[in-house]
Image (cartoon, rainbow, N blue to C red):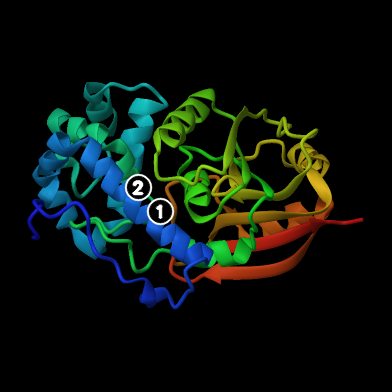
Amino acid sequence: MKSFFFPILLFFSFHAFGQNNTSPHTQLVTGLVNYRNELIAENSDNFKEISKLDTLWKLGAEHQDEVQAFLGNVIYAHEVALIPPKKMIKKWEKQDLPFFYLLSEDNIRIILENKHLIGLLAAGILEADPPFKIASGTWLFKELDFYKIKDRMHVAEIGAGNGVFSLMLGLAYDSLSIYVNDLNYSNVEFAMSKITQCQSKKDGNKYIFVNGKKKATQLENVKLDKIIIRNSFHHFSHRAEMLESIKQSLLPDGNLYIADPFLAPDHSFGCNKVMPLEDIKKALLENGFRIVEEKHNPDWDWVYLHCKPIT
C-alpha cells in the first residue's frame, strides 16, 4: 500500500493521450488534476483519515465494481436520501456484501467527509489507490469524443444524479451553457453544491440547475444543441412523454445521446430496471428518434447511442 502522505501537486504526463494543448482531453486532464488537488488541499486533515479505509482499497479488481457502487451508495444514502449512518448499517446488514464488516459509522463518516473526492473514485474516474491518479481504464475520454461537444454549445444532462459528469464538462470545455437536470430535487441540490464549490471548472461556463418532471424536461423553451442521458434512460417511467419533451427541447439540428447499461447473459446489474439492448432501441424508434451511431463499452455492457429526431 502506498503512503497517503505525498506532495499535493503531482506531475502528470499529458503525452499519454497524444493530444495537443487545447484538446478537450488535455483540458479535462488538467482540470481533473487541479480538482483532485483542490479537494485534497481544502480537506487535508480529514483526507489523512482515508488511510483507515486501506482494507477497502485492497479488495482490488476482484470487487472493484462492488466497491465503487458501495461508495456511491453511501454518499447517495446520506446526501440525497438523508439516511443516517446507523440506519444505513441496519439496512445493508442482510445483504451479502464481501466488505460489510467495513460498514462502520466511523468509516461512513470518513467517506462522507471526503465525499466529492470519493465520488470521483466511485465513478471510476480516479484510481482508488493513492495518489489517486486518473484511472487508466476510464471511459470518460471516449465519451467526450462520442458526444462531439464544442465550446459555446447549449448542453443538458437529463437525470444527472450527483452531477459528476456535468462537472466534468465544465473542466473539459469552455463557454458552455450546461443544464443539470434531475427528477429528484435533493440530487439537484447536491449537484449544485458540488459544482458551485468547484474552483477548477472553467469560468466561461454557465451552469443552470433544473428540477425535471416525470413527463417533461422543463427545458422545452431552451432549445439545446445536445441532450445527454447517462445511466438514466432505463429509469424513465413515461418514456413516450419524456422523449416528446426532449424533441421539443432540441434545436432543429440538435442531437440526443443515450449512454445506458443493458441486460446481457454474463452481466448482472444492481438495478432491476436495466433493459435489453433491443428494448432501448425500440423505445427510441417508436417515439420519433433514429439512431445514427452506436458504440459499446465491452467491459461494462453499456451502449452509447447518438440519435436524431425523425423529421
Residue 105 is situated, as x and y percent measured from the top left of the image, at 16, 28
Checking the image for residue 189, the label placed there is: none
Q: Horizontal placement of 266 versus 226: left or right? A: left
Tell me what residue is drawn at x 65 percent, y 29 percent: 212
For this rendering, which residue is in front, 62 or 162?
A: 162
Residue drawn at the location 49% of the way across and 73% of the way down: 20
Q: Quadrant of the N terminus?
A: bottom left
Q: CA distance from mark 1 to mark 2?
A: 6 Å
Q: Nearer the viewer, residue 254 or 307?
A: 254
Q: Is residue 47 left or right of residue 23?
A: left
Identify the image quadrant of residue 130: bottom left
Asked whether residue 139 is in view, the answer is no
Q: Determine which quarter of the picture holds residue 131.
A: bottom left
- The amino acid type of the residue labelled 2 equals Tyr
- From this viewpoint, is residue 250 visible? yes
Q: Is residue 285 above or below residue 248?
A: below
| Outermost residue toward the right in this view | 311
Could you tell me which secondary element the residue under label 1 belongs to?
Answer: helix
Image point (58%, 67%), residue name: 145
Q: Residue at x 45, y 32 (%)?
A: 196
The disc at residue 35 is 2
Asked whether disc 1 touches disc 2, contact meaning CB atoms under 8 Å apart, the reply is yes
Residue 72 image offset from top left, x and y in percent: 35, 42
Dot 1: few (<14), some (14–19), or many (≥20) neighbours within 10 Å? many
